[in-house]
Amino acid sequence: MRQNIIRHYGCSSELGPLVGQLSAERVLVLLGSSSSATEAIASLIEDLSGRCKIEVIRSASKLPELEEISAALPKVRAFSPELIVAIGGGRILDLAKAINAFAGVEEAKLEAFLSGKENIPNVLCPMVAIPTTAGSGSESTHFAVVYRGAQKYSLASPLLLPEYAFLDGRLIASLPKFVRGSSAFDALSQAVESYWANSASPESRRNAAASLTRLRRILPDKIESRDPVHLQDSIEAANYSGQAINVSKTTAAHAYSYAFTYVNGIAHGQAVGYTLPRIFDLHDRAENAKIIHPMGPDGFRDIIRELKALLGIDQGGSPSEWFFSLLDDIGLSRDFSSIEFEKDYV
């Protein structure tokens, strides 16, 4: 399925007309607690309620948790929506994807779908994704993360890709500096990891490069800017990183960071801020014998050189120092020495 992406400042106001165009009479809306408080999103909901019957589910959990998904399913099934609209960060978009996938699944069979033993056969209805942070790019991926306790599951199916995505820089204008910085570093890490991933393709590398090009226009000094151009660059950079990992997936920096987020409650972008600089250094200094990549050691070194050029890192300099300087400038931490690790978990 080819996704329909609407990308311009203020484009979320076109949601109502789209609902009319799709002739959707019952629309399920999923919101995060912070998203539902903004004037722009309140206006979207008001417009929708005047066009169709809506059911709103507000989520306050910190992660997309199976318990919350299961609790919502009876309400969703009873409402029987013809369209799902997810408005929020990556967590809310993942929740919406999982609800859409599990609405037609018996409770006893959820385990098989979570573990990947069975493929998702269908989804309940079409989905519209409207991100209100600029980090995960989840609006353009066919993945969804679900947690059951400390266990993280990754759902994957072409059916999970939302049919429509609205990229509206206006919706991130009120985010505080830390959230914008953390989100931007998440997008940056996704783009870097996608670019060097073993399963990258020419298309995914083009999308990763498009993400990094936009991020360089806003990092570090425009991270608090409310200029529509900079806001739009931010949200489109995240989307391109999402499109990139939709093909290549992420690598070690993201894999390691999930424990920081789940166990220690650290924002995801900050978590990859701890891991990516150090992993980039390891890749930059890797000996030929330790490089296992489809393009071989020489090809992989070309990839690292290209990434340095895209990021503006001096070819002879230390990547980690460049990243640490960026983290300082955008209000994130480089030091995790104060974090208490649970050895049984890691």
Image (cartoon, grey):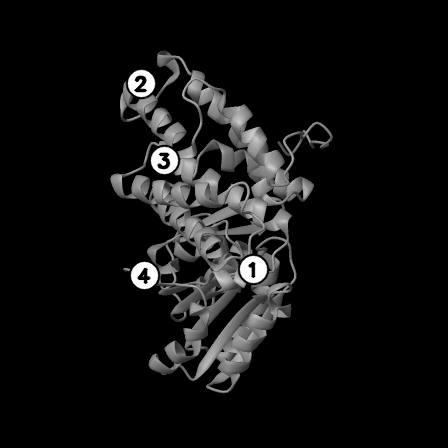
How many residues crowd mark 1 within 10 Å: few (<14), some (14–19), many (20+)? some
How many residues crowd mark 3 within 10 Å: few (<14), some (14–19), many (20+)? many
User: Which amino acid lies under the numbered mark 2 shown in the image of this protein?
Assistant: Pro
- Left or right: residue 264 compared with residue 160: right
Q: Which residue is mark 4?
A: 3
**For the residues marked 1 and 4, what is the alpha-carbon distance in whole angstroms?**
25 Å
Q: Which residue is mark 1?
A: 173
At horizontal 64% and vertical 58% (from top left) the residue drawn is 61
Please tell me the numbered disc located at residue 191: none
**For the residues marked 3 and 4, what is the alpha-carbon distance in whole angstroms?**
22 Å
Of 275 and 233, the residue lying toward us: 233
Q: State if disc 4 and disc 3 touch (CB < 8 Å).
A: no
How many residues crowd mark 2 within 10 Å: few (<14), some (14–19), many (20+)? some
Q: Which residue is mark 2?
A: 297
Q: State if disc 4 and disc 1 touch (CB < 8 Å).
A: no
> Residue 37 appears in which quarter of the rendering?
bottom right
Residue 278 in sight here: no
Mark with earlier residue (2, 3): 3
Residue 157 sits above or below residue 33 on the image: above
Q: Which residue is mark 3?
A: 195
Mark with earlier residue (2, 1): 1
- Could you tell me residue 156's position as x and y percent? 40, 51
At horizontal 45% and vertical 44% (from top left) the residue drawn is 217
Residue 13 in sight here: yes
